[in-house]
Amino acid sequence: MKNLLLTLTLIGIFFAGKSQSGCDCDFKTTLGVHYNYYKGMNGAGIEYGKTGEESNFNIHVGFDLFFPSQVYKDKHQAEGDTAMTGRMYNKIGYRIIRIPYELSIYTDLVGGLDMNMGFFYGVGLKVLRPLNENAISIEPIYIPGKKGGWNIQAAFHFRL
């Protein structure tokens, strides 16, 4: 199953890149400030990236910092310990639905390095709503694996 998801991720990245390679696209630079929820941990982060206005393509680089909201125990932690964790990631996305000035829906492929999981990858669906020159979004991301699960990200995007 893991190899199948990795293969589908690589195929998605290839076709998203190929569809944009011959495009003279108008990209807008954005800075997103977001809230994250992942397995009992609340976090905050930022992401910087380019979103195509006339194109269906976007790419973002981000950083998250999680503060655990519950005490947990595993083989490396004594009972009662709390730990702060973080992650760096990049996203590549393709817009599948666009209603001008109303709504955009992107499929995203996410990959990066997490202090708790190590290297990870996942898939997400970003629902983005424009607000004047800025936007808000909500994005559920699924990260497969034993330490994976659902990650929910709500963001406010500033246009730079």
Image (cartoon, helix red, strand yellow):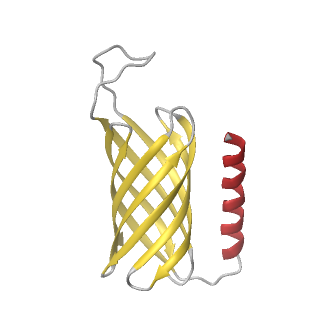
Q: Residue at x 54, y 64 (%)?
A: 107
Where, by quadrant of the figure, is residue 136 drawn?
Answer: bottom left
Number of numbered discs present?
A: 0
Foreground residue among 129 and 26? 129
Instruction: Tell whether 151 sits left or right of 33.
Output: right
Residue 143 appears in view = yes
Q: Residue at x 38, y 85 (%)?
A: 101
In which quadrant of the rendered image does the N terminus lie?
Answer: top right
> From the viewer's perspective, is residue 134 above or below residue 40?
below
Q: Residue at x 63, y 84 (%)?
A: 24
Q: Residue at x 58, y 82 (%)?
A: 25
Residue 160 appears in view = no
Across and down, in percent, residue 154 comes to 34, 58
Instruction: Tell whether 61 sits left or right of 131.
Output: right
Where, by quadrant of the figure, is residue 8 drawn?
Answer: bottom right
In which quadrant of the rendered image does the C terminus lie?
Answer: bottom left
> From the viewer's perspective, is residue 16 above or below residue 143?
below
Instruction: Tell whether 84 sits left or right of 96.
Output: left
Across and down, in percent, residue 71 comes to 29, 25
Across and down, in percent, residue 50 comes to 50, 70
Instruction: Tell whether 126 sits left or right of 54.
Output: left
Where, by quadrant of the figure, is residue 157 drawn?
Answer: bottom left
Across and down, in percent, residue 83 comes to 33, 27
